[in-house]
Amino acid sequence: MSCILELKHVSKFFGGLAANSDVSFEVQREMILGLIGPNGAGKTTLFNCMTGYYPPSKGEVNLKGVRINGLQPNAVCRLGMVRTWQKVRPLAKMSVLDNVMVGALARTNSLRVARQVAFEQLKIVRMEAKADLLAGGLPIGERKKLEVARVLATKPELLLLDEVMGGLNPTESEEIIQLILELKKLGLTQIVIEHDMKAIMRLSDRIVVLNSGEKLAEGSPQEVANNPDVVAAYLGEAADA
Amino acid sequence: MGDRSGALLPRARAPRGFSLASLVALVALVLVVALIPQVIKKPLILHMWIMVFLAVAQGAAWNLIGGYAGQYSVGHAAYFGMGAYTTMLLLEQHQIAPWFGLGLSVLNAVLLSTIIGSITFRLRGPYFVLASIAVAEILRLGALHFKDYTRGAEGILLSGIPPLETPWFAIRFVGKVPFYYASLLLAGGVVLANWIVQRTKLGYYFQAIREDQDAAHSLGINLTLHKNVALALSAAFTAATGALFALYVRFIDPNIVLGIDVSVQAVLICIIGGIGTIPGPVVGSIVLVLLSETLRNPKWLAQLGIVGYDSAPVAFIEAHFSNAHMLIYGILVVLVIEYAPDGILGLSRTAWNRWRRARRPEAPSQPSAA
């Protein structure tokens, strides 16, 4: 395994508030990294810093050995790292297929090729039957799957999934879990933000825990689950400690 | 089960190919329209057509940036005026023939759009709209102020257009007919540009930007570049329309070609017809031009033979509505936004679907029957 993404002392300040401070970790190829932490821990801010929505205030983000601080999201996408949105962003007045084609067009100028690529991605998320529907009319579970199909169409090497299971029922969540494992087999590296602990323990090869913008712990799912600091951050300090 | 719930969702109209039937229909339509001046010689009626064609060109040009890319510029008078002024000044002061002037005016407008775009595209939503209005107003006030170059409020009167002579043919710009064909060609060209954009990567990227800028950005779309390309295309066609308008009307001043009325008209044509569609600006132009020209000069109805020159409707309009076209526009926009947010085109599509459903009540489109 080799390192695909490296964060070195990444900090992000909004005025005096440190949304992320001094976060460092590495992501190896073909692994699933779980990124967890209580609400407001700075998980989504970190995604925004990595994908170019904000430049980090301090520190470095290296993708495949290239420093990408200050690159725009479109450039980061073309380098092979792309994210989904916690609050889904379907292109509402375009069809499901057209949504995915927009992603595919990052790698081709031909609509014919893009249509073919898009259709393959819809098959991966099992939505090919919905190709002609308007994206704005889909229920939440399918919107989440559409997000995934759309980023897959950009042919990424590193996928950042921001709470793709949020708001889904157990059956739908299970489908997404299977999908993430399937994508891992296809050789994709993934960073997954998720609140569902059972799911994250099953999926992750490694977990990074954020709390109040700082990295609290890092390790295998077992190590993290047994870490007293992590337990305290989630459940509060024990009364007799 | 899943399939049935899907069938109840609104269906997208994916543009796939172009059927032979619609191609034949389009060619037939263009031929019929092109033959009109050979049959109808009445100048007021030809004038109506020319105004419709110019409006189609203006509306379809705005549709590229406003309809597809979703950037509601209310400052397109800047490009319209740039086209009109460049062509007229080159012709009147430097004796440069208007077909070269038109080319230069398009170039000028593209340059201007790049400057305006680099300023205003830093802003989103209502801020972009306000900035676009402000820039157009700066140009209008500038044209009023720098009299030495633009002749200010006095305006520019065209003394004459030299004939276009080529080894094969010569065109003399006398009467309405040459302008009829020139404006028809321009309108057709801009509608064709819309059609091409809708069927290429550019159109997909424009629409993605319209639907969600952040999502588009994360999917590899260079927002600044594509917004500027949309604006430059739109500005180029708007300038050509402005130039042709100036040559046809033969008089321009800053309020006529750079006023906010021009900017608003471009937007209204699309909103009333159906924004972000190809037939939308055409439908909107017909409605808006017929309405405004009727209010300004109802005598064309008499030339058409619908009413007499001295009949009651003509007298009534002349007495009460001769300057009210902006008021009527306003009322029309309120009605369209309230009752037909997708424009006349959207309204007719809904009506057509309802009619088809009424004819086949056993069709699966009735969810309660299932």
Image (tube, coloured by chain):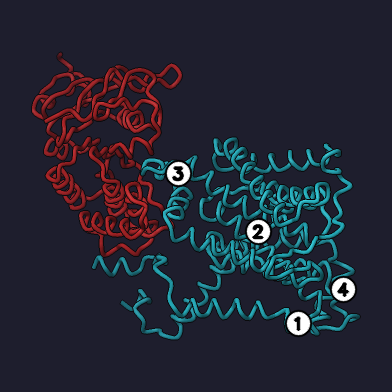
Q: Is residue B218 visible?
A: yes
In this view, the mark in front (2 or 1): 1
Give the color of chain B as drawn: cyan
Query: Which mark's residue is nearer the viewer, 2 or 3?
Result: 2
The residue tagged 4 is B316
Could you say which is closer to the camera, residue A171 or residue B350? B350
Mark 1 to mark 4 CA distance (whole Å): 27 Å
| Residue B331 coordinates in the image, percent (x, y) | 71, 61
Chain for disc number 3: B
For the C terminus of chain A, the quadrant is top left
Amino acid carrying label 3: it is: Gln
Which residue, given by chain and number where applicable, does mark 1 sit on?
Answer: B40
Residue A110 location (% of width, % of height): 35, 56
The alpha-carbon separation of the residues under discs 2 and 1 comes to 25 Å
Density class for disc 4 (Cα within 10 Å; few <14, some 14-19, many ≥20) is few
Q: Which tag, 2 or 1, sits closer to the chain's start?
A: 1
Q: Earlier in the sequence, mark 1 or mark 4?
A: 1
Q: Disc 3 vs disc 4: Cβ atoms closer than 8 Å? A: no
The residue wearing badge 2 is B58
Q: Is residue B236 left or right of residue A100?
A: right
Q: Nearer the viewer, mark 2 or mark 4?
A: 2
Name the subunit of mark 1: B
Q: Residue at x 33, y 60 (%)?
A: A112
